[in-house]
Image (cartoon, rainbow, N blue to C red):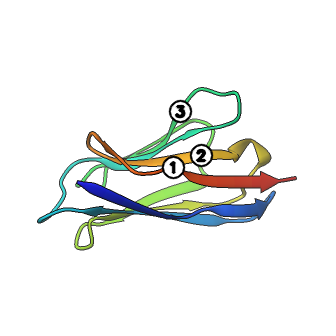
Amino acid sequence: VQLQASGGGLAQSGESLRLSCEARANGPVWSAMGWFRQGPGKQRELVASISSRDEKNYGDSVKARFFISRDNSKNTAYLQMNFLKPEDTGVYYCFVGNSWGQGTLVTVSS
C-alpha cells in the first residue's frame, strides 16, 4: 500500500489545519489508519488512529482538539487539527496498518 499524505504547513497558535492520508491500494483498505508525530527533540507519539469500523483513539495531548475521520470509499483518513499550539509542531506521519507515508511538517507559531 502506498500512502499519499497532504495538508499541514504553517499556522498560528489557535488556528486550524487539516491533514489527509490516502491509501492507494487495489481495493478497500480495512486496516487502522492514523498519524504519529515527532516534535523537535521529542519521541514519536501517537496523535490519532481510526479503525475501519470508526473506532477512534487519540493521544492525550490532542484530545478534544483534534478529530480523525475516514472515508472508506476513498481509502482516505483525515485529521482535523483545531486550536493548534506551538507544541503541536512536528513532522506528522500517516500510517495504514504497517505502511507509512512520508512525513508532513506542521509548524505552529505563537
Q: Nearer the viewer, mark 2 or mark 3?
A: 2
Residue 6: percent from the left, percent from the top?
A: 49, 65
Q: Quadrant of residue 71?
A: bottom left
* Disc 1 and disc 2 in contact, CB within 8 angstroms: yes
Residue 34: percent from the left, percent from the top?
A: 40, 49
Residue wearing tag 3: 45
Tell me if 97 is positioned left or right of 41 in this view: left
Please give the count of numbered marks on the rendered protein. Answer: 3
Q: Residues within 10 Å of mark 3 (few under 14, many from 20)?
A: some
Residue at the spot 53% in from the left edge and 37% down from the top edge = 59
Residue at the spot 40% in from the left edge and 51% down from the top edge = 101
* Image: 38 above or below 82: above
Residue wearing tag 2: 91
- Which residue reaches farthest right? 110
* Image: 75 above or below 52: below
Residue at the spot 72% in from the left edge and 53% down from the top edge = 107
Q: Nearer the viewer, residue 7 or 67?
A: 7
Distance from the alpha carbon under mark 1 to that under mark 2: 6 Å
What amino acid is labelled 3 in the image? Glu
What amino acid is labelled 1 in the image? Gly
* Image: 16 above or below 49: below
Quarter of the rendering occupied by the N terminus: bottom left
Q: Report helix, strand or loop for mark 3.
A: strand
Q: Residues within 10 Å of mark 1 (few under 14, many from 20)?
A: some
Residue wearing tag 1: 103
Distance from the alpha carbon under mark 3 to that under mark 1: 13 Å
Residue 43: percent from the left, percent from the top?
A: 59, 26
Residue 63: percent from the left, percent from the top?
A: 58, 45
Does label 2 or label 3 sit earlier along the sequence?
3
Distance from the alpha carbon under mark 2 to that under mark 3: 11 Å
Residue at the spot 26% in from the left edge and 43% down from the top edge = 97
Does label 3 or label 1 sit earlier along the sequence?
3
